[in-house]
Image: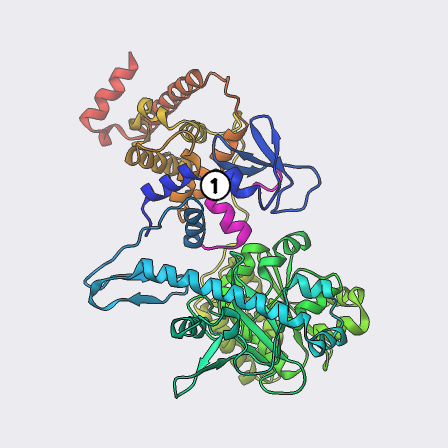
Amino acid sequence: MISQSFIQELLDRVDIVDVIDPHIPLKKAGANYTACCPFHSEKTPSFTVSSTKQFYHCFGCSAHGNAISFLIEYNGLTFLEAVADLAARVGMQVPTQHPGSHSTTESESGGVEVEAGGKHLHDDSESASKQMIEVTRAAARFYRQQLRHSASAIAYLKMRGITGATAGHFAIGYAPAGWHNLEGTFGPQAGKAQQALLKNAGLLIENTDGKYHDRFRDRIMFPIVNLKGVIVGFGGRVLEHGEPKYLNSPETPLFQKGRELYNLFAARRAIRQAGRVLVVEGYMDVVALYEHGIENTVAALGTATTPYHIQKLLRQTDNVVFCFDGDPAGKKAAWRALEASLAQLKDGKNVSFLFLPEGEDPDSYVRKFGSEAFEELLGQTLPLSVFLLRELSSRVDLKTDEGRAKLVQDARPLLAQIAGPGLALMLLKRLAEISGYSQNELEDLLKIRRVSTSPARVRTPRRESVSLYQWLMQVLLYDPNYIAKFDRELLAQDDHEYAGEVAALRALVEFIDSNPHVKKSTAIPSVIAYFRASSHRALLEKAGSTTLGWDSDMDLEAEFTGAMARLREMRHKQRMSMLHAKALSALTPEEKQELQRTAY
């Protein structure tokens, strides 16, 4: 948990323009800044950043948020990672809580470090992390230098069709043969402490007799970069024959291969421009596709696809395409990717699969047939729903009752994981067609909640563009000082027609009451940060976005007073209608007196 006061102070110190501008060059446009939106393709800039409100909004795709949410959506960071990133920029230390007698801190990898005796060495561990980053960066420089002087490594890359420009783009290097090359890069002063640091970074291996040697030897080296742009590990490929063909860095405090994807940091812009990400199996697949102009590609790091991989990818795009070999190993890897995807699949998010001809991988295919032929293959992808049912059906005999029953039972745990109700319903319908059960029978058999297919009731728009509740949300977000004039009694009773808006306005009022330090300049980003996991988030973000176009010369005082008066009148009419609808015998004495007062 990070306190709201810390988030508020952090947003006070950060300028959203400085956060966004390095990623998307902004141009001054009146009181705001504009650019082409990074979250959808457009030629005319509709992405607006307000320095005074510390908020961004796209009038094309409605993307909006504060500095924290920008880093989450653009860089694919978690909330904690985005807060830590911003805090580091302004020299703030993210506070940690130390429950119980043992002080703990939970890392983003999910692990918990505990220092015996209750003393948590936070500063020491932070310093060690920085040192590890430095030695990893130094190792990458060393491998790059060694590549320039290795005729065999250069010849290998040329043989694979990799140009010097592409090798430079990926910072590809070479780990020379020999057992003690890396230690020499740190000079003669490198002692036991330096060796231990290199070991902890996964670069050295300690023998049973306490001596160290290089982990990577005579291998092409691929630096692995996380979403902060930091080198956290390496993948090494043998030049000729040898085992293992690929050798990755071990798990370290910097590197957890189940959470990282090769090339995701560099491919973010290409992924957004293409509207999809292509996930392949190896480093050379990514590099070869880039060489042929296909840049929206990433690779898992010698491990099966994990839910964390899927989460990161779906933060970058709504469309994920897994590309695997057509052999049994490729089908097995694809099925693991499918299983990892199910719980992340909300409606509007798409996962599909491309199986290459047997004996081909993306690297070999694109070198043989070219990028156009490969792009044509992408038109033959299998949607997850098709692959799921096709694979399950291949495992049973659909000609028998027993086989069809087995199909239904095999599908049950998979369908239960799907987060998107629309997709789950479509899969259920298709399963009914294949199995011979009716949809109702399947719902009862699988204990799946039925999804209504009747159209939602559409309310006729009011004459005003927004409701009074939405308008008051906008005013309070634009200037929280109006809370002093807000009549809270108007929110005491529910309004069933606008239940969601009343609840959101009520929550906003409570937030401002509890946080009197919230400033006019940071009200919107503070509210977004606070309500990031709330059901009210969408309404509040929409209200905040609207205020970006407000004119500072508008008579907000008169508008606010008029809105409060109209809301009082509306509430009064609602109250009277409710009382008149009750039977006389059901009225309380107080309610009867209330009706009598309004009759005069």
Residue farthest toward the front in the current orientation of the protein: 188
Query: What segment carries the magenta color?
Result: 60-78
| Residue plotted at (38% across, 18% down) | 565
In this picture, residue 168 sits left or right of residue 107: right
Please, which residue is most extreme toward the top here? 600
Identify the residue shown where x is 71% and y is 72%: 362
Asked which quadrant contains residue 102, the reply is bottom left
Please tell me which residue lies in front, 148 or 9.
Answer: 148
Q: Up-down: is 182 above or below 498? A: below
Whole-percent x, y for residue 51 in the image: 51, 32
Q: Is residue 30 above or below residue 117?
A: above
Q: Judge whether residue 589 can be spotted in this image.
A: yes
Whether residue 532 is in magenta: the answer is no
What residue is rendered at 33% in x and 61% in y? 124
Specify the amino acid type for callout 1.
Asn
- Dot 1 falls on a residue whose secondary structure is loop
Say above or below: 355 vs 58.
below
Whether residue 69 is in magenta: the answer is yes
Q: Quadrant of residue 25?
A: top right
Badge 1 local density, few (<14 within 10 Å), some, or many (20+)?
many
Q: Position of residue 29 (x, y in %)?
A: 61, 29
Q: Compare residues 416 and 276 and report the one nearer the observer.
A: 276
Q: Nearer the viewer, residue 236 or 593?
A: 236
Where residue 198 sits, quadrant-wise, is bottom left
- Pinpoint residue 20: horizontal percent, then vertical percent: 55, 42
Residue at mark 1: 66
Q: Is residue 516 left or right of residue 540?
A: left
The residue shown at (31%, 59%) is 122
- Quarter of the picture containing the C terminus is top left
Q: Nearer the viewer, residue 361 or 160?
A: 160
- Residue 64 placement (x, y as % from top left): 52, 41
